[in-house]
Image: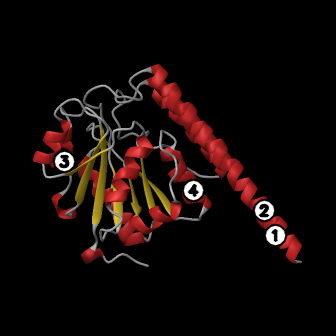
Amino acid sequence: MKINRDAVTVGVIIPVRNEEASITKVLQDIPEEIKAVVVVVDNGSSDATVCFAQESGAVVLHEEIPGYGRVMAKGIQYFEDKPVDIIVFLDGDYSDYPREMTKLIEPIINNGIDLVVSTRLNPLYDKNSLPLHVVWGNRMVVFFMNLLFRTNHTDLGPFRAIRYDRLIQLQMQDLDYGWTVEMQTKAKLIGLKVEEVPVKYRQRIGQSKISGTIKGSILAGSKMLYTLIKLRLISVGNIRAKYIRSRDCS
């Protein structure tokens, strides 16, 4: 079903932990014309992140248990009984440009796209914004995702938009760092229309909890690869089960 451009409703989910230096900038830069409902999900901040988010008009939720996917699930849950057409996921560190949000939602409204994923590894991004180990780790995960699932991605950009009804169809399960690759691979498996959009990218404010250390990046990358392998085995199992059922009926 096509989204009504004149009445489109957008929800924005922003995961945060100790982002007091950036969260106000992120919230202020969300385009006013989108008229989004913005939900900030705090994952145990010990600074003034929550206060600044509330002062900027965001809905603030709390998820005390660590986990990227768990935080996202909390934000998605908020919209279960709300009228929303599109969900946008945006980090709270000001590395993405929130004003580019229209670039992500327009293909959904105008071209019938289901999922739009930002790609940062293009001429638009600040070459100092991502450490070398993050760039190569990202490329390795994307390579295996494209190999195993015949996708055509270039990045795992966290800045992304998806139709809400399609998001529910994906039945997201991962509660950790495998969340991004789960979305992209499941979108391929169920036949969603997916598009990549180049975005600008800059050095984040503060240190990343994931890519700020080589150890953190290795742990995150390992979880992503594990998620890809698990989803591949599940998809092969489903194909085999369908084949057996069709053979039994013949």
On screen, residue 30 versus residue 87, left or right, reads: left
Distance between the alpha carbons at the discs numbered 2 and 1: 6 Å
- The image quarter containing residue 81 is bottom left
Sequence-wise first label, 3 or 1: 3
Residue 98, can we see it?
yes
Q: Cβ–Cβ below 8 Å for labels 2 and 1?
A: yes
Q: Mark on residue 186?
A: 4
Disc 4 or 1, which lies upstream in sequence? 4
Q: Examine the rendered structure and indicate whether residue 58 appears above or below residue 11.
A: above
Query: Can you give x and y, in whole percent of width and height, for residue 235 in the image?
Result: 69, 55
From the top left corner, tell me how far across and down residue 208 is, in percent: 35, 28
Q: What amino acid is at disc 1?
A: Arg
Q: Which residue is mark 2?
A: 241
Of marks 3 and 2, which one's residue comes earlier in the chain? 3
Q: Quadrant of residue 5?
A: bottom left
Mark 4 → mark 1, Cα distance in angstroms? 23 Å
Residue designated by label 3:
27
Of callouts 3 and 4, the N-terminal one: 3
Real-space Cα separation, disc 3 to disc 1, in angstroms: 51 Å
Mark 3: which amino acid? Leu
The residue indicated by pointer 1 is: 245
Can residue 158 be seen in this snapshot? no
Q: Point out the frontmost of discs 2 and 4.
A: 2
Q: Is residue 235 above or below residue 228?
A: below
Q: Are marks 3 and 1 in contact (CB under 8 Å)?
A: no
Would you say 115 lies left or right of 33 here?
right
Q: Residue at x 47, y 40 (%)?
A: 176
Q: Amino acid at mark 4?
A: Lys
Q: Residues within 10 Å of mark 3 (few under 14, many from 20)?
A: many
